[in-house]
Amino acid sequence: MVGIPEAEPFHGTGADAVAVRGFLHRPVSAPRAGLVLTHGAGSNCRAPLLVALAQAFAARALVVLRCDLPFRQARPTGPPHPSGAARDREGLKSALQALHGFQPGRLFLGGQSYGGRQASVLATEAPELVAALLLVSYPLHPPGRPRDLRTGHFPELRTPTFFAHGSTDPFGSVDELERARALIPAPTTLLAVDGAGHGLSRGGRASRPPADMVERVVDGFLSFAGEDGASRGG
């Protein structure tokens, strides 16, 4: 993206000595807020959607750390194991602690699919960590199993939450997500992307998302989080 420096490889640890691995996107001006972004169960922090979102947020004066969850640091392929979910949340907590060194002000946490699910659970466990959540393609249930809902923690979620969801996502319909977010006592909003699937694109999961859709997500989240005055970096 014109006017935005290249992402820097990042390796560090949080206060709990959980490794943080990913890429840091710095805005050209002083950051107004910070955002940690993470990936889904079958992906990593190099996912085209995460890269596009990180670049767009950096262009709006946020410092962004897109990171690999601990399960992905442990092995390059394969899904996470349920027994490792708590460790993955510790990884997100460490990433937030690491980002705090670059942005001592407001921090946000976002994730696609599994990453967003663990971000939302972490927010119920430690609500003081972030000012708002960005949940992209939240996996309400496994495809074809609408009764196996992953919303048990929603009534305990008191962090403002922005959902971005494709209308053809097999992990939950827009109508299902509307019903689910009614369980959350905190402010929420939903950006529905017509014709988009689980990667918020009309192609495969690895397809680069359309630029106009990325801008809709970024603009919508910043407005929701009260950061819509952030200036563009180039």
Image: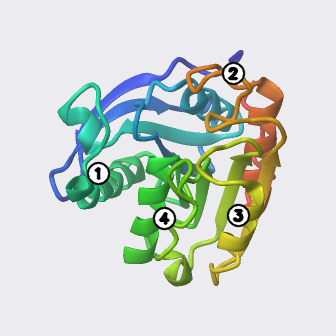
**In the depicted structure, whether residue 39 falls above or below residue 201:** below
Q: Are marks 1 and 2 in contact (CB under 8 Å)?
A: no
Which numbered disc, 1 or 2, marks the residue that appears first in the sequence?
A: 1
Q: Which type of secondary structure does the marked residue at label 3 adopt?
A: helix
Q: Residue at x 62, y 22 (%)?
A: 204
How busy is the neighbourhood of tag 4: few (under 14 within 10 Å), some, or many (20 plus)?
few
For image coordinates 63% across by 50% down, the residue present is: 32
Q: Which mark is residue 91?
A: 1
* Disc 1/disc 4 C-alpha distance (Å): 26 Å
**Which residue in the protein does label 3 denote?**
176
How far from the left and from the top, in percent, is residue 158?
56, 80
Q: Is residue 123 left or right of residue 162?
A: left
Q: Residue at (52%, 39%) from the top-left corner? A: 64
Alpha-carbon neighbours of circle 3 within 10 Å: few (<14), some, or many (≥20)?
some
Q: Which residue is mark 4?
A: 148
Residue at x-position 35% and y-position 49%: 95
Q: Amino acid at mark 2?
A: Gly
Choose mark 2 or mark 4, whichever is in front: 4
Q: Amino acid at mark 4?
A: Asp
Split into 4 quadrants, where in the image is the C terminus?
top right
C-alpha distance separating marks 2 and 3: 23 Å
- Residue 26, how many percent across, how many down? 53, 32
The kind of residue tagged 3 is Glu
- Left/right placement of residue 99 relative to residue 57 reads left
Front label number (1 vs 2):
2
Residue occupied by mark 2: 203
Quadrant where the image shows the N terminus: top right
Secondary structure beneath disc 2?
A: loop
How much space separates mark 3 and mark 4, taking CA atoms? 12 Å
First-in-chain label (1 vs 4):
1
Residue 29's label in the rendered image is none
